[in-house]
Structure formats: C-alpha cells, structure tokens
Amino acid sequence: MTPIRLIAAALALTAAAAAQAQTTVKDAWVRGTVAQQKATGLFAQITSAQGGKLVAVRSAVAGVAEIHEMSMDGNVMKMRALSGGLELPAGKAVELKPGGYHVMLLDLKQPLKEGDSVPVTLVVEGKDGKQETIELKAPVKALKTPAGESHKH
C-alpha cells in the first residue's frame, strides 16, 4: 500500500471512530478528599448527540461508583442513587454538579489530592440499546474550591 493510501485509510478509520462517538464529556473533575474520607463526587458536562442514558460508572480508585441526584425537600437535603440511570436528552448538555446530578465514588482506596488524575469509565446506552464506553482521566480539584471558581476575599 502506498503512503498516501495508508494515510487515507488511517483518516477513514479516525473519521469512523469519531462518527461512532455519540457522547462527549467536558470539564470533568473530581473533588479532593481528606485523609480518612471514603467518598467524593465526579462532576462534568455530558452531551449525547442522539440521546440516551448514563447507565454505569466505574473507577479503579473506588470500590463503588454510583449515579446520584441531590435535591432539597424544604430544608432537607436528599441524595439518592439513580438505579435506572440518568437520561441524556439528544443534543442537550446534562450537567453533573455539586447540588444536582453527580457521580459518587464510594469506598475510596486512597485519598485524592489536588493534581491527581482519576480514571473513570462511563457507560452510555443509546436509544438503539447499543452501549458506548467513555474513558476519562478526571483531574482532582482542591477540596474547598468548586470547579472554575477562585475565591477572592
């Protein structure tokens, strides 16, 4: 095969892989922990081009990873696992953030400090039932600093 054909074949494979990637994840991060803390959250923006559902999460740093929703009922904060997954409407970003939808990383195997990188696998099921696996390396942000904020006093 000529070098030009090899390049064309590689580009075609890259385009095919990109066309199959139906879900994008932006601004993923994990909140840092303190020494004995056994749980933390993963936050990000997830967009599914065709629509689907976030159905599973895994991470080597946690014994358990769950999709959660936090809500307020009057003055009471309620958090619950979404056992049926999180709906991802077609073309609309779903924000995983403190105080809303998020991923809980439970039974942590070690403390997570700012500057660490956490491997996370997301599994999204499309409307057609096909599953897409997304591998992330989410940076750990300081325990006291929400994403994108710097405190000025």
Image (tube, rainbow, N blue to C red):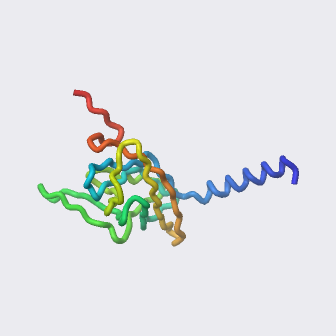
Image point (78%, 48%), residue name = 7
Instruction: Point out the image quarter for the C terminus.
Output: top left
Q: Nearer the viewer, residue 35 or 57?
A: 35
Q: Nearer the viewer, residue 90 or 27?
A: 27
Residue 24: % across, % down: 50, 53
Horizontal side of 91 relative to 73 (left or right) equals right
Name the image quarter holding residue 59: bottom left
Image point (60%, 60%), residue name = 20
Horizontal side of 70 relative to 21 (left or right) equals left
User: Which residue is situated farthest in the top direction here?
Assistant: 153
How many labels, in total?
A: 0
Name the image quarter holding residue 73: bottom left
Image point (46%, 54%), residue name = 47
Seen in the picture, residue 140 relative to 126 is either above or below; the reply is above
Residue 5: % across, % down: 83, 51
User: Which residue is situated farthest in the right direction here?
Assistant: 2
User: Which residue is situated farthest in the left direction here?
Assistant: 75
Seen in the picture, residue 153 relative to 69 is either above or below; the reply is above
Seen in the picture, residue 38 relative to 84 is either above or below; the reply is above
Q: Nearer the viewer, residue 32 or 101?
A: 32
Residue 93: % across, % down: 42, 51
Instruction: Point out the image quarter for the N terminus.
Output: bottom right
Seen in the picture, residue 74 relative to 126 is either above or below; the reply is above
Residue 147: % across, % down: 34, 42
Image point (27%, 49%), residue name = 34
